[in-house]
Image (spheres, helix red, strand yellow):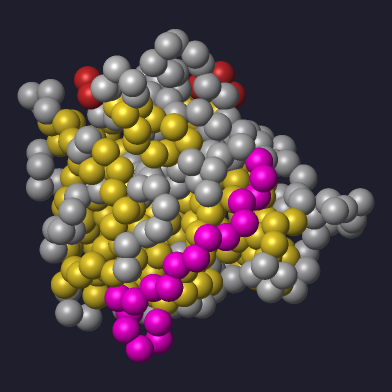
Amino acid sequence: MLPKSDCNKTTKHHQAKTPVKAVFTGLLLMASGFAAAATDIPPLPEPVSNQLVLHTSVRGQPYLASFAGIGAAKTAAAMHNKVWQLSSGQSNWQNIAVLPTASRVNGRIATTGVVLNKQFFILGGYGQSSDGKSGTLADSYRFSPVTQSYSKLPDMPVAVDESVAFAHKDRYIYLLAGFHNSGAVNLVQLFDNFTQKWSQATPLPGSAVFGHAGVLVGNEILFCDGVKTTIAADGKQQFETEAACYLGNISDKNANNISWRPAPHHGGKARTRQGAIAVEVNGETMAAFIGGSETPYHLNGVTDDGKAIEPSSAIYLYSFKQQKWLKAAPSETAVMDLRSLVLIDGEIFSIGGMLAGQQVGNTAIKHKIKLLPE
């Protein structure tokens, strides 16, 4: 989405079937328990986009949850704090207590989150209050899928939305860049779940961005694309996609130290609000970047000049072992406005999101990985 002026947040806002297996990463803790077919995951109670979806398993019981987001009307008034959770044996999503807020906002989008120690962490986001005021939110929460209870976390030092987060070593959460009230930042904020304190890690190289995507595998971070803020000749702020990727290696001795270096770009058009997740393909750990939009857009999927934006079906795969991008067949269903992807029994899913024609969905979409000849 675009900035948040007037509640319009643009982005800023042939081989046989390739074997794909779940990978334990810093992004999500994968678990089985749901049948790995989109038709076996019931539709959400209502269409929702730009929500945070997380998945974990506790004592063999899987939990899938959708936090906040924006409804089918795609207006500021359609932003909400609703939460739904699904577990095995349930035929429908269950209504959960709404996501708390310290800012009295009516709804929250562009939030970031991770699974850490089998609990869901919901970080920041963008919201609007009943008096029409809007902005980036600093308050964050821990949610137990078992007890369905929330615990407030210390506010992040610099509030961000449309950020990217990774869980690391069952202790740390890295929050990369994001949008802060009026522009993008290049900060890497680090939360220590042991001490319950925030600190600053090595900042990102290159342009400050938001709406980017990435994965953490072992100690290595890969993030790509997103949107940067620039100033036009007339002095007005504008938003442009950023075609760039970076790799970062987290120090084993000091969690705040990250060695960053440029990485090759996948070569396609830069995208915003795509999903990214780590998967195992043909025995290799790879980063899959799926969906998104090639153009920044407002809440309603339309640009400043009235152009309706369509989602991308492209899938880009990066092999950490080969240190290069591999060709992959596009997804059968194009989707954008994503905050996260989940792996269920080794299959990649997005839940809801914005589909063709700027329609907000409520179904699970399976994204199959199929390598193509180089």
Write down the quadrant of residue 127 in the picture. Answer: top left
Residue at 56%, 19% (x, y): give it.
357
Residue 358, placed above or below residue 368: above
Q: Please, what is the dominant secondary structure of the magenta stretch?
A: loop
Magenta residue span: 251-268
Residue 251, placed above or below residue 151: below
Residue 131, placed above or below residue 373: above
Residue at 52%, 22% (x, y): give it.
309
**Does residue 122 appear anywhere in the picture?**
no
Expressed as whole percent of the image width and height from the top left, the position of residue 326 reads 74, 56
Locate residue 7 relative to residue 1 in the image: left or right.
Answer: left
Residue 213 in the magenta stretch? The answer is no
Expressed as whole percent of the image width and height from the top left, the position of residue 124 reads 24, 50
Pick whichever, 277 or 65, lies toward us. 277
Expressed as whole percent of the image width and height from the top left, the position of residue 196 reads 17, 74
Expressed as whole percent of the image width and height from the top left, the position of residue 24 reads 54, 73
Locate residue 245 relative to residue 67 in the image: left or right.
Answer: right
